[in-house]
Image: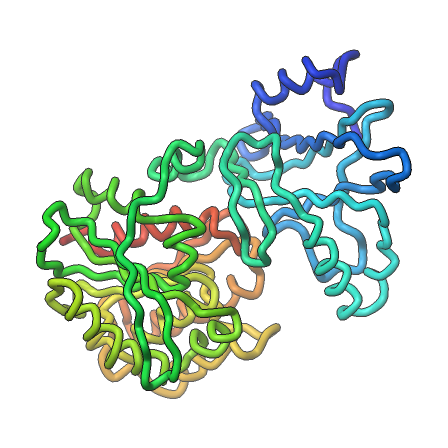
């Protein structure tokens, strides 16, 4: 590992660490028009003498770290006689993604070389020790596996101006209205967060967006303020944003992948509840559904099968492989191969991270079949992995694209 040129004789001193914070961590240096050198840093805290020494500081980057390989992940390197750990990687200038650091005093990497189950156990254990980058000045958040992660935006990533105040910790979430949906069809109940962007409290809404994984967009990465900013600037029409929670991961895994009962319940129970609660004039041309991963699959499934409710869909990293993990052509694609939609949706947008190999392949298959039936759509790839850091920007861009003429 080459030592960075900016490692000076006082590397590891208090003044040196202060200088790194002012410079920005991770440190980003452009190599050429396509690549940047990114140097990650970790400051080892003081430890009791009897505590086992840190053997490695694993770097876990969404879309880059391969959790299936039998080799250990890449570790930061300890700079001698200091509290500095560092690692430089070369990444595309358009990269955007989240990462975390995992200090490890055991370094039992031999488990990785056994079977896939031992590998999973090793990673599960590591994730309990994962931490966000405390030297990164931008706000961290809780990722899908529950560990805290930090953001990395390289210079040529698409701008996300509506999120900048949140990232800097300068913005608090806007208040949302919470209703409880008790579903007789599904036999459960859940919270549904709602936000309307019209200035008048009693406004009648014509546009509605159903955001799956509602608890994430309501609480983890609160999207109400970015939506309000775009509405105030005339980039989005006044709209109702409906965010139902998943209840838990078990319910999500059962309800989101191509579940007709789930959508019948939304159509027959939740949408009428929204009508009772708000002034909403239902119009499928102005009603869309969006989600990521299983939620992306669910969004397109709903749009293809109930276009009388949802005229448009936005899928982010849609898991169109389901239920055949490892094979691109899943249930929904097979459904399209067998028959055309009775009523074609008005428009579908698909986006996928170019580091998501299987999901990219499955989205290409979906693109092919939507083209076959002349369904208006667009497929776009993003430089990133299976990551909310680009989903949040693409969600805003997709809403604008789907409602741009309204």
**Residue 315 in the image: above or below residue 6:** below
| Residue 291 sits in quarter | bottom left
In percent of width and height, residue 180 lies at 31, 69
Nearer to the camera, 152 or 10: 10
Residue drawn at the location 39% of the way across and 79% of the way down: 188
Residue 380 point in image, percent of width and height:
41, 55
Q: Where is residue 375 in the image (x, y as percent from the top left)?
A: 28, 70
Seen in the picture, residue 240 relative to 27 is either above or below; the reply is: below
The answer, for residue 34, to whether it is visible in the render is yes
Asked which quadrant contains residue 228, the reply is: top left
- The residue depicted at 45 percent of the width and 53 percent of the height is 381
Q: Is residue 350 left or right of residue 147?
A: left
Foreground residue among 65 and 144: 144
Nearer the observer, 299 or 29: 299
Give above or below for 216 relative to 325: above
Q: Is residue 263 left or right of residue 318?
A: left
Please say whether residue 377 is visible from this viewpoint: no
Please identify the quadrant where the N terminus is shown: top right
Which residue corresponds to the image point at 81% horizontal and 34% vertical from the top-left? 47
Q: Kindly identify the residue that appears in the image at 32 percent across and 80 percent down.
A: 183
Percent position of residue 218, x then y: 37, 54
């Amino acid at each position: 590992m080459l030592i960075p040129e900016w490692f000076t004789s006082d590397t590891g001193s208090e003044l040196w660490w202060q200088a790194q914070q002012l410079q920005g961590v991770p440190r980003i240096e452009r190599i050429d028009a396509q690549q940047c050198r990114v140097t990650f840093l970790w400051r080892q805290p003081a430890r009791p003498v009897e505590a086992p020494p840190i053997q490695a500081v694993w770097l876990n980057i969404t879309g880059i770290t391969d959790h299936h390989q039998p080799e250990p992940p890449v570790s930061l390197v300890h700079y001698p006689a200091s509290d500095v750990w560092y690692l430089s990687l070369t990444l595309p200038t358009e990269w955007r993604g989240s990462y975390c650091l995992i200090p490890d005093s055991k370094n039992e990497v031999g488990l990785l070389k056994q079977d896939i189950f031992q590998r999973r156990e090793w990673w599960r254990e590591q994730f309990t020790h994962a931490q966000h980058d405390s030297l990164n000045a931008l706000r961290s958040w809780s990722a899908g596996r529950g560990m805290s992660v930090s953001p990395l935006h390289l210079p040529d990533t698409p701008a996300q101006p509506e999120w900048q105040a949140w990232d800097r910790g300068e913005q608090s979430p806007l208040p949302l209205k919470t209703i409880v949906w008790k579903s007789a069809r599904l036999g459960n109940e859940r919270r549904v967060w709602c936000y309307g962007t019209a200035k008048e409290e009693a406004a009648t809404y014509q546009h509605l967006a159903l955001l799956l994984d509602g608890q994430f967009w309501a609480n983890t990465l609160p999207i109400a303020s970015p939506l309000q900013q775009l509405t105030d600037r005339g980039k989005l029409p006044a709209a109702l944003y409906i965010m139902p929670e998943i209840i838990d991961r078990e319910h999500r895994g059962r309800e989101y992948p191509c579940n007709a009962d789930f959508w019948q319940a939304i159509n027959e129970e939740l949408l009428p509840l929204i009508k009772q609660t708000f002034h909403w004039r239902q119009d499928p041309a102005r009603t869309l559904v969006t989600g990521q991963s299983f939620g992306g699959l669910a969004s397109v499934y709903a749009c293809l099968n109930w276009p009388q409710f949802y005229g448009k869909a936005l899928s982010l990293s849609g898991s169109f492989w389901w239920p055949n993990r490892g094979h691109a052509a899943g249930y929904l694609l097979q459904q399209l191969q067998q028959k055309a939609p009775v009523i074609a949706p008005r428009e579908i947008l698909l986006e996928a991270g170019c580091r998501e190999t299987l999901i990219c392949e499955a989205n290409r298959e979906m693109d092919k079949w939507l083209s076959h039936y002349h369904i208006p759509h667009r497929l776009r790839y993003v430089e990133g992995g299976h990551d909310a850091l680009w989903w949040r920007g693409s969600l805003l861009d997709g809403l604008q694209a789907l409602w741009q003429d309204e």
